[in-house]
Image: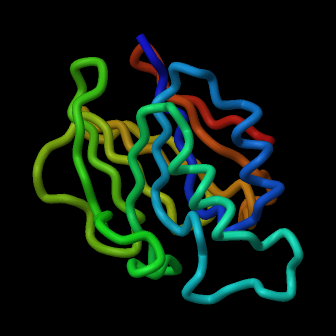
Amino acid sequence: MSRLFITADVHGNYSVWQKLLSKLLPDDVLVIAGDFFGNRFPDANNPGYQPETLRQEYLDLPNQKYFVYGNCDIPGFFPNQSYGLSFLHDGKQVFVFHGDSNPPREKYDIVISGHTHVSGIQNLDGTLYINPGSPARPKDEAASYAVYQNGKAEIIEI
């Protein structure tokens, strides 16, 4: 079964995106829990800030993928997405949102969020909560992403 490759809070950083792509396997399902582009508050002085390139490379990826807006993403830059979405993966009901709003009221097997820039995995009342942290601007000093496969989640430092 394919794994979920989970990231959030890339904030338009192209070199970080390239590092993530180097870890992405051909059959991975890519999940981006917001602030991928970071263009509401652009880091225009950083030469690595390339949201247009990230957008095109994301669109060109052959992998199955899911993306939700974060508080730093401008919806008009990447239209027709949402702030929260659910999908079925390996028989598990998954919900993805950025994490800057209230968590869903419905029951899900897995809830994925970002926003805090701090990685964590927690199992509460039968729901697995995954925050991959941030590969670009970690607040816990560990640039990271997460992987979910065969019922287990893991935070991976870059």
Q: Which residue is drawn at 80% across and 42% down?
A: 158
Q: Residue 75 at what x, y percent from top left?
A: 39, 78
> Coloured how?
rainbow
Quarter of the image where one finds residue 107: top left
Quadrant where the N terminus is found in the figure: top left
- Residue in front for this viewpoint, 130 or 30: 30
Q: Quadrant of residue 155?
A: top right
Name above or below for residue 77 compared with residue 120.
below
Residue 119 placement (x, y as % from top left): 60, 51
Residue 93 seen in the figure: yes
Residue nearer the viewer, 105 or 46: 46
Residue 84 appears at what percent x and percent y?
A: 27, 60
What number of labels is visible? 0
Q: Is residue 145 above or below residue 143?
A: above
Q: In this view, does 2 lie to the left or right of 43?
A: left
Q: Which residue is drawn at 27% across and 70% down?
A: 102
Image coords of residue 72 (percent x, y): 52, 80
Q: Residue at x 29, y 26 (%)?
A: 89
Regarding residue 119, the answer to whether it shows in the image is no
Q: Residue furthest left?
A: 106
Q: In this view, does 88 lie above or below 6?
A: above
Please name whichever residue, 60 or 12, is drawn nearer the observer in this view of the structure. Answer: 60
Question: In this rendering, would 24 be left or right of 93?
Answer: right
**Residue lying at 41% horizontally and 54% vertically, measured from the top left:** 67
In the rendered structure, the answer to whether residue 63 lies left or right of residue 91 reads: right
